[in-house]
Image (spheres, rainbow, N blue to C red):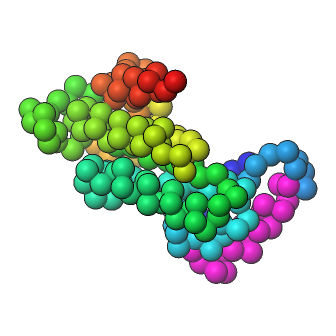
Amino acid sequence: MGFFNEGQSDNASATESYAKMAKTFRSRDASRLITWADNRMERSEALPHADVVSFNSYPGWYNGPAAGIDASWRAHAAWVAEHYPEKPFIISETGAGGLVGNHSDNATAPARWSEEYQVVVDGLDVRTALACDNISGIALWQLMDIKVDEPHNSTRRPGGINNKGVLDRWRTPKLAAGTVADAYASVP
């Protein structure tokens, strides 16, 4: 069971709500694991109430350069393993945006919003998750591009579209789809 997507888990006054929700869900179905997508990560005060620690973060997109993706996820995973060794850690939300047909001329440092930059970020996210023993799973945000707001209201999403999908709005694969599929296919 998941609840409170990116809630205020670092606020001590919110911790009671996490505890009550976890207790309520466990009382209804004890067979299900309890988690939430936590973007407060190591600052979260609610993690004792989770069965699975789940972090939302976007290294290489919102948080630093792509070169830091592996180290960022490994640091989060090591922190969870140290502080909550009995709990699996998953990457509950991560990725990068890529505009369909927007290609970068620079192969070594592709431009932000290019399909090539999305390949770099999504590929590093997935390969890191698959290679790190302290990471139990990953969910890229998201499968397909979706409309999220009106184009004139959007400040960080061109055309009011969340372009982080590995497929476009018409389910046509972007370059990142092949990279992600290849990473999963390489797992023995």
Q: Residue furthest left?
A: 105
Seen at 30% across and 54% down, the residue is 68
As drawn, is 51 to the left or to the right of 76?
right
Query: Does 73 appear above or below 161?
Result: below
Q: Is residue 16 something one can see in this rendering? A: yes
Is 117 in front, or is 127?
127
- Total tally of numbered discs in the picture: 0
Q: Is-magenta flag for residue 13? A: yes
Give the residue at the far right of this rendering. Answer: 27
Magenta run includes residue 98 = no
Q: Which residue lies at the image location 70% right of the left edge and 68% below the top edge? A: 48
Q: Nearer the viewer, residue 161 or 37?
A: 37
Is residue 37 visible in this depiction of the protein? no
State left or right for residue 133 relative to residue 114.
right
- The residue most toward the bottom is 13
Q: Position of residue 66 (x, y in %)?
A: 27, 49
> In the shown orientation, is residue 129 left or right of residue 101?
right
> Looking at the image, is 101 positioned above or below residue 104?
above
**Residue 122, located in which quarter of the rendered image?**
top left
Q: Residue at x 51, y 56 (%)?
A: 77
Magenta span covers which residues?
Answer: 10-26
Q: Main secondary structure of the magenta part?
A: helix
- Residue 57, given in percent of the width and then of the height, sits at 44, 55
Q: Is residue 37 above or below residue 108?
A: below
At 53% from the left and 73% from the top, the residue drawn is 43
Q: Position of residue 170 (x, y in %)?
A: 41, 21
Is residue 111 found left or right of 20 in the rendered image? left
Asked if residue 139 is positioned above or below residue 14 in the image, the reply reads: above
Q: Specify the quadrant of the image occupied by residue 178.
A: top left
